[in-house]
Amino acid sequence: MKLPPRFSELINRLGRQDLSYLSGSIVEGTGHAHSDVDLYVIAGLTDESLEADGINTSTTYHEAPVPILIEHFEGQRWDLEYWSKAAADAVITKLESDFTSGRKSISHGDAEFLCRVVNGQPLTNPSGHEQLRERVLRAGLRQVLMRRFAYSAEVRLEDAAGLFKSGSTREAALQIRDAFGFVVDFELARNHDFSLSAKRRLLRLERTESAVFTAEDYWQAECIQADEDLGGWCRKTTLRLRRVLANVE
């Protein structure tokens, strides 16, 4: 894959121990012709050097300052996130803490960054990238994501129970539908498919050998397709989801 010239120039200046990798839907096989291309760099260039390349060092989607450059090249949008090694280490340390303590302190954006590390395709220093990937997995990414998705599902199931008891069956069904999506994410993470994005969830489930859900199961839940009355669907689906969540690691 041909990189935008400015991105190529930056990567060519990286040191031997620095990392660069592609990630996101295209690399993971769930993208399409108009998908963005996501490029990550973990290195030690200075803010002055980055600003000389036109990278906005104040823009960030994460807790730590993470400079981002957006480029349109040959009909596609490219996003480059530049992580310092210290910022990446801090996120992994927080993951390790969440794994051992059971807390949910890591932010959505930082958790997605860790998923992108694991799913990434290295452009430089492949051995260094593999070491980082193994470090993230040892730090407990799979277990932390499963707990995170389980918690999100449980919150919605609790809300649904209250709505159902009050007679708001349609509102309860919508909460259960949302919970179903998080339980699908839970099952995908159990099968080592890591992402916090609901986008392409159906396609990811189609290619995963899940013994719990099929893609058709998920589609029917999203559409709230029920052979019985809506109340019966709510009760049956809630019971099914709780059985799956009973296996949180």
Image (tube, rainbow, N blue to C red):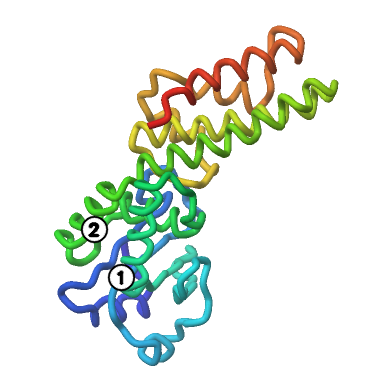
Number of numbered labels in the structure image = 2
Where disc 2 sits, the SS reads: helix
Q: Amino acid at mark 2?
A: Leu
Q: Which residue is mark 2?
A: 132
Residue at left offset 48%, top offset 22%: 244
Gap between marks 2 and 1 measured at Cα: 10 Å
Q: Amino acid at mark 1?
A: Ile
Q: Left or right: 203 with respect to 95?
A: right
What label sits on residue 233 in the rendered view? Answer: none
**Label 2 Cα neighbours within 10 Å, binned few <14 / some 14-19 / many ≥20:** some
Residue 218, percent across and down? Answer: 55, 25
Residue at left offset 42%, top offset 70%: 80
Residue 54, percent across and down? Answer: 45, 86
**Outermost top residue:** 228
Residue at left offset 37%, top offset 29%: 208
Give the vertical position of 113 relative to 192 (above or below). Answer: below
Residues 158 and 121: in front is 158
